[in-house]
Amino acid sequence: MADGNLIYVCDDEKDLREMLAEYLGKHGFEVRQAGNADEARALLADGKPDLMLLDINMPGEDGLSLLRSLQGEDAPRVIMLTAAGETVDRIVGLEMGADDYLGKPVDLRELVARVRAVLRRAGKSDEGSASTDREGRIRFGKTWLDLEAAKLFDEEGASLPLTSMEFNLLKLFALNKGRVLNRDQILEGAHDRSWDPFDRSIDIRISRIRKKIEPNPTKPVTIRTVRGIGYIFDPDAS
């Protein structure tokens, strides 16, 4: 995806905020800054960005509260900024639909890579891609995954909400159908990050995905749990 996308950086740490804005600006992004949730809402009132970098722990209204209000099809993509020890907040944020997260201190090269990855997932397709032609699509339960468009469609061809990280997870399963994947393989393959034994984000994301793809999410058959090992994608499940 070409640079020039509009990014809002919302963080109460001025030095960090300005550093992120300067670095992103050098890489061709248009950046606007907000020091708290109120300033972010003022920016949002002027127009929707392509992506928002959102600090979770801010004085006053925190980032999770602001994230909760950014719902719906017109909501911007969101990458959370989380400090060490904010595992619970990070999990809640992912469960609420954030696309990714970055821990502080932020690695600037990783920041640009993750921003581009999220934007790439969001911008590869348009409304015309939701056709009834399923050539090249992979069935996941009651839905179809289009790897080229990076989107998920229902039986009628309507696009379903899908975060960047959920797409990465579905793509990983699609490329490993019939193979049991353990947590290490899932975390490394779908998220490119080392395993954290206390990280429940994979379980949360699979639970969210099952609600979208399974005819009965309480009795999943498409992405099944293999007790004590991990998960398996069974495309032939009825």
Image (cartoon, helix red, strand yellow):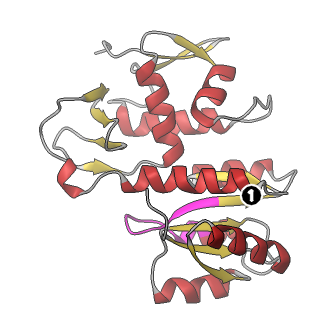
**The N terminus: image quadrant:** bottom left
Direction from residue 201 to residue 231 in the image, left or right: left
Provide residue 191's location: percent of width, then percent of height. Answer: 62, 36
Tell me, yes or no, whether the highlighted magenta stretch contains residue 96. Answer: no
Count of numbered circles on the image: 1
Indicate whether 177 appears above or below 201.
above
The secondary element bearing badge 1 is classed as helix
Tell me, yes or no, whether the highlighted magenta stretch contains residue 69. Answer: yes
Q: Residue at x 71, y 53 (%)?
A: 109
Indicate whether 134 appears above or below 64.
above
Direction from residue 178 to residue 51 in the image, left or right: right
* Residue placed under numbered mark 1 in the picture: 108
Provide residue 116's location: percent of width, then percent of height. Answer: 54, 54
Q: Residue at x 66, y 73 (%)?
A: 9
Provide residue 66's location: percent of width, then percent of height. Answer: 62, 72
Q: Residue at x 17, y 32 (%)?
A: 134
Which residue is nearer to you in this view: 226 or 130?
A: 130
Residue type beneath disc 1:
Leu
Q: Residues within 10 Å of mark 1 (few under 14, many from 20)?
A: few
Q: Which residues are magenta?
A: 67-79
Provide residue 164's location: percent of width, then percent of height. Answer: 49, 47
**The C terminus: image quadrant:** top left
Indicate whether 140 appears above or below 33.
above
In the picture as drawn, the residue positioned furthest to the left comes out as 132
Q: Is residue 97 visible?
A: no
Q: Is residue 145 visible?
A: yes
Q: Residue at x 87, y 50 (%)?
A: 85
Indicate whether 213 appears above or below 165.
above
Q: Residue 147 falls in which quadrant of the image? A: top left
Which residue is nearer to you in this view: 123 or 100?
A: 123
